[in-house]
Image (cartoon, helix red, strand yellow):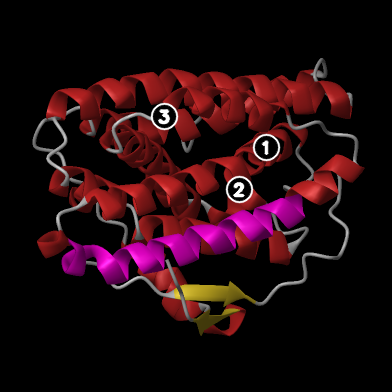
């Protein structure tokens, strides 16, 4: 099992955020803003799914997961809170979070479902966040240097996502979830996640007034498909989840622990409770 430390990030989220905080680049800023908009609703769902999955475990299995579930919940709750503060700045800039509303309506369809299904959905989403986190940690310069506290926010979040990437997956296996449903939900989550990311990014660019600028799409093409492009570098790790013998621990992320070790002055450990 994984020892998950809950950390309080020592940054000021009250200070204003520049409209193009990510290196002055509209596309990169719009995409990261879109991802942030999904986090409060998404992470609350992950917390609820993992808690329900833990409670559905036989008593003899719960001790194995208790501490890790507490750490998972604590980390995700901290992410949810800080990104809610981040998103409040975006709302003041005139950006509208359509993603959250769609997600909330979609999640209502899961009410009353076998708890293994929400855990499988969580595991699939955690794979997306883990490979995104790994990419960010390997390419931190793409966050820009205009606002160091925001770069710290995204790198800290990425490091913790890498830390707990196996929690929901292991819980699903402990609940005797089937491989077929694990892969089915991953395929569905892929379509939903990519579609929502695209829609919210385009919405952000439109409201920002930069949707039809040439530099926006030139930057987007490079950011997604260039030598260090997000899609180009995460395609293979994404596909590995479809293997029947896959486990998140097979994708090593030493840069996550390295960042946490080298930036101890940016956070303080706190307690956690499920």
**What's the magenta region?**
62-86
User: Residue 182, percent across and down?
Assistant: 23, 30
Nearer the N terminus, badge 1 or badge 3? 1
Residue named by callout 3: 232
User: Residue 88, percent across and down?
Assistant: 81, 49
Location of the N terminus by quadrant is: bottom left
Nearer the N terminus, badge 2 or badge 1? 1
Question: Which residue is at a point 66% across and 35% down the rendered structure image?
Answer: 34
As measured in the structure, the alpha-carbon distance from the residue carrying label 1 to the one carrying label 3 is 16 Å
Mark linked to residue 64: none
For the residues bearing labels 2 and 1, Cβ distance under 8 angstroms: yes
Mark linked to residue 28: 1
Q: Nearer the viewer, residue 48 or 81?
A: 48
Dominant secondary structure (helix, strand or loop) of the stretch shown in magenta: helix
Where disc 3 sits, the SS reads: helix
Where disc 1 sits, the SS reads: helix
As measured in the structure, the alpha-carbon distance from the residue carrying label 3 to the one carrying label 2 is 15 Å
Q: Is residue 266 left or right of residue 233?
A: right
Residue named by callout 2: 142
* Residue 268 versus residue 108 in the image, above or below: below
């Amino acid at each position: 099992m994984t020892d998950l430390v809950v950390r309080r990030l020592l940054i000021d989220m009250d200070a204003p955020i520049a409209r193009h905080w990510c290196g002055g680049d509209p596309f990169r800023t719009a995409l990261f803003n879109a991802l942030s908009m999904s986090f409060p609703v998404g992470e609350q769902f992950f917390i609820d799914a993992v808690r329900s999955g833990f409670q559905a475990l036989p008593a003899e299995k719960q001790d194995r997961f208790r501490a890790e579930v507490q750490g998972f919940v604590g980390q995700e709750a901290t992410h949810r809170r800080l990104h809610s503060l981040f998103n409040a700045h975006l709302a003041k800039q005139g950006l509208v979070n359509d993603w959250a509303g769609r997600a909330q309506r979609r999640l209502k369809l899961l009410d009353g479902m076998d708890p293994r299904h929400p855990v499988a959905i969580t595991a699939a989403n955690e794979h997306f966040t883990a490979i995104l986190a790994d990419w960010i940690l390997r390419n931190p310069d793409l966050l820009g240097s205009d606002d160091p506290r925001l770069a710290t926010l995204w790198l800290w979040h990425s490091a913790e996502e890498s830390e707990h990437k196996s929690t929901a997956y292991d819980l699903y296996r402990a609940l005797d979830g089937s491989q077929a449903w694990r892969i089915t939900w991953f395929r569905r989550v892929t379509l939903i996640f990519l579609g929502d990311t695209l829609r919210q990014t385009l919405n952000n660019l439109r409201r920002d007034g930069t949707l039809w600028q040439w530099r926006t799409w030139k930057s987007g093409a490079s950011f997604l498909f260039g030598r260090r492009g997000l899609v180009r570098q995460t395609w293979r790790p994404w596909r590995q989840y479809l293997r029947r013998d896959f486990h998140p621990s097979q994708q090593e992320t030493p840069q996550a622990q390295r960042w946490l070790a080298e930036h101890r002055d940016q956070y303080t450990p706190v307690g956690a409770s499920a």
